[in-house]
Image (tube, grey):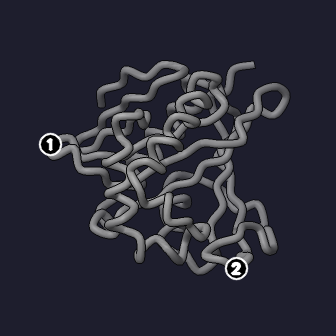
Amino acid sequence: MEITSTPTQVYERDGEIVLRSADLADAELICSYFVENRDFLKPWEPARDEEFYTHYGWYQRLTKLRELHKMMLGYYLLITEVESGKMLGTISFSNLVRFPMHSCTVGYSLAESAQGKGVMTKALKMACDYMFRIHNMHRVCACYMPHNGRSEAVLQRLGFEYEGMAKSYLLINGEWADHNMTALINPNWRG
């Protein structure tokens, strides 16, 4: 595994995938990913406006995300193939809170073509290890809809523990959806 991550930039490689910070130059790559996976991701994501599926829309989003990266308040990461550079998915960290919680929330998406290959398990492990190692987070929280068995399986493989049900938690595809709440605790947290 190759690691060159810093508090404001992420670059981690494990086998055939790279987990890295998104950059302004990635607007077209990200746009293409979401256009290609639009129908597949629709049941799992908030309703998106048309600008979300444009190069310009992603350039604008990445400009804002770059500031969050610099301030260490949020991270938007891309999962790509080493050889082709093809984008396979995203992992984002938000709601970063330092003292006294040392906690954050993770969200993710994976291309339809990458399903069932262990990509998200490997990438999410790298991402959580980064948050624990570099940012000294004590806990990473993740929520998933109860009928999303793939997401549940990934989180269980990584050791996320069920903490409860959040009723009408997120507005997904135009409707309020219940979510199971889970968390992963950093066994090496430094006080």
Image check: 14 left or right of 74?
A: left
* Residue ID for mark 2: 175
Q: Residue at horizontal 62%, vertical 28%?
A: 188
Where is 189 relative to 40, above or below?
Answer: above
For this rendering, which residue is in front, 131 or 168? 168
Q: Residue 30: x, y in percent?
A: 37, 50
Spatial separation of the CA atoms under disc 1 and disc 2: 39 Å
Q: Secondary structure at mark 1?
A: loop
For this rendering, which residue is in front, 185 or 166? 166
Looking at the image, is mark 1 or mark 2 nearer the viewer?
Answer: 2
Quadrant of the image containing the C terminus: top right
Q: Residue at horizontal 81%, vertical 73%?
A: 167
Image check: 84 left or right of 92?
A: left
Q: Which mark is residue 83?
A: 1
- From this viewpoint, is residue 67 visible? yes
Where is 107 relative to 129, above or below?
Answer: below
Q: Residue 62: x, y in percent?
A: 49, 39
For this rendering, which residue is in front, 7 or 130? 7
Mark closer to the chain start, 1 or 2: 1
Q: Residue 73: x, y in percent?
A: 66, 31
Q: Residue at horizontal 51%, vertical 31%?
A: 130
Among the 4 quarters of the image, the one containing residue 96? top right
Where is 116 relative to 104, above or below?
Answer: below
Q: Secondary structure at mark 2?
A: strand
Q: Are marks 1 and 2 in contact (CB under 8 Å)?
A: no
Among the 4 quarters of the image, the one containing residue 120? bottom left
